Structure formats: C-alpha cells, structure tokens
Image (tube, rainbow, N blue to C red):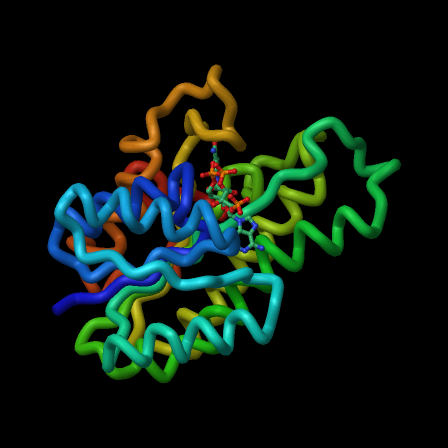
Amino acid sequence: MKTALITGANRGIGYEVARQLGGKGFHVFLGARDAQNGPAAAERLQENGAIATFVSLDVTDAQSITDAVHTVAGVADHLDVLVNNAGILLDEDVAIARLGIDTVNKVLRTNTLGPLLVTQAFLPLLSRSRAPRVVNVSSGGGQLSGGMDTWAPAYCLSKTALNAVTSLFAAALPNISINCACPGWVRTDMGGAGATRSVEEGADTVVWLATDAPVELTGQFLRDRKPIPW
Ligand code: NAP
C-alpha cells in the first residue's frame, strides 16, 4: 500500500492534502503537533473511509522528528510521499527594517529548517519506496524573480530558503522526486477568508506532485501544475 506523511495536517492545506491522498488509497500519516487536534483530524479522515494514522510531529523539535520516524516505521516499511506543509506566518505587518531576530529564528526554524530536518530523518524510509516523492509547500512570497515586495519579510525569506533546500536535495538525490509548490492564496487560517482559492484548489498541485506528476520531474518550483520562476 502507498504511504504518505503530511506535516501540519490537522487543518488548512495540509488536512486537505491528507484528505485527497486518503481518497486516492494512500495510508495517510497525519503529522500534527497538537495532541487533541491531530488525533481528531485523523479520526475525521477515518470516518470518511481513509486509512489514517496520527503521528505526533513538531517540525521544530529534533526529538519529536526522531519519534515520528519510529512511529511511521512501526507501521510501514517504506514511505512513498513526504509533504512538508507545516508553516507559520508571524510578520505580515512588520517591515524588514524593524524585523526582530526572534521572529526570524522562529519562522526559519518552522518553514525552512523543519522541512530540511524532517526530509533528512525520513530518507531511510523514503529510500525503500520504488518511486519516492517529496513536496515542499512553498509560496510565491519566496520568489526572487521580479524582485520582492515589502510584505512579511521573515516569511518570504523562509520560503526562498525552502526553495533552495528543495533545489539542493534534488541535486543530491536524483532517485527522489523533490519539488516545491506554491498553492496560491488560499482560504485557511493563514490565508484568511478573503483569499481567492479554496483549500481544494490550493492542494491540487501538491497532490499532483505527490501522485500523478512525471516521476522524473524534480528540482522544480510549481504553481497550477506548471513550473514558475524562482
Ligand atoms: P494554516 O491553516 O495556518 O495551517 C498551518 C499548519 O501548520 C497547522 O496545521 C499548524 O499546526 C502547522 N504547524 C505550524 N507550526 C508547526 C510545527 N512547528 N510543527 C508541526 N506543525 C506545525 O496554514 P495553511 O494556509 O494551511 O498553510 C499550509 C502551508 O501552505 C504553509 O507552509 C504555508 O506557508 C503555505 N502557504 C499558504 C498560503 C495561503 O494562502 N494559505 C499561501 C502560500 C503558501 P497547529 O494547528 O498546531 O498550529
């Protein structure tokens, strides 16, 4: 059976990706840091007929990542798909000139170092898949092409660096399909009610990269299933 781990999957885009992959017959490992919301989200997927297992996973905590590997390895002998989705946005209204280092540290630890460390930790299980795939949920806010604007500097920095993490892994591990995707502006707690896209639309490219995209496609940054400039 195909297996997938999604980080930050208790709500928002992560939950929707887990729901869609569960619907496609994956055994879904629902990664979440919250001891109440995580199991509750896994139960909702199970009620919809999916095979779903809650995995306690705080992507900023090295011990939690190690424990999550043991949890997944205790149930599955391989991992086909890793979706690094967990993310935070703390500095929407902060200018780069006043950006505090604590904010930068927190955002980078979650949005950039989290995916780096989680990917490293799950490589042994991924390498036992016949066609392993990693999808990093990035953002157009991290695009350098065309210049950046003034919005959310720590968040944008973290996503530019996440794109670099993606590129570096893709160069180093040609047997794994590793890409990053921008979901667009999505109606979640992070995106807000005024966003232009539903969670279904936001999850589409991520799920496609995790399933039906050509497995040779790697080291790309995509939106709406098409490569976009870095
Ligand atoms: P969201 O609704 O705020 O959900 C974020 C998820 O990340 C939650 O499940 C949250 O868990 C989890 N998370 C945060 N820190 C974590 C940690 N240290 N360990 C584990 N999980 C953690 O956000 P979203 O809109 O679904 O965003 C998902 C991804 O899409 C993010 O990477 C985001 O940057 C990206 N994105 C979103 C948009 C948008 O318009 N929404 C646009 C571009 C990119 P808790 O419930 O425990 O807080």
Where residue 34 sits in the image (x, y, percent)?
A: 51, 51
Residue 102 vertical placement versus 193 (above, below): below
Left/right placement of residue 159 relative to residue 31 reads right
Which residue is depicted at the point 28% across and 48% down? Answer: 43
Which residue is depicted at the point 45% across and 29% down? Answer: 188
Q: How many marks?
A: 0
Q: Is residue 107 visible?
A: yes
Which residue is depicted at the point 36% across and 46% down? Answer: 40
The quarter of the image holding the N terminus is bottom left
Where residue 48 sits in the image (x, y, percent)?
A: 17, 42
Q: Nearer the viewer, residue 23 or 223?
A: 23
Q: Is residue 218 visible?
A: no
Which residue is depicted at the point 34% across and 73% down? Answer: 72
Left/right placement of residue 47 relative to residue 220 reads left
Residue 21 vertical placement versus 164 (above, below): above
Residue 32 vertical placement versus 223 (above, below): below
Where residue 130 sits in the image (x, y, percent)?
A: 17, 77
Where residue 131 sits in the image (x, y, percent)?
A: 20, 72
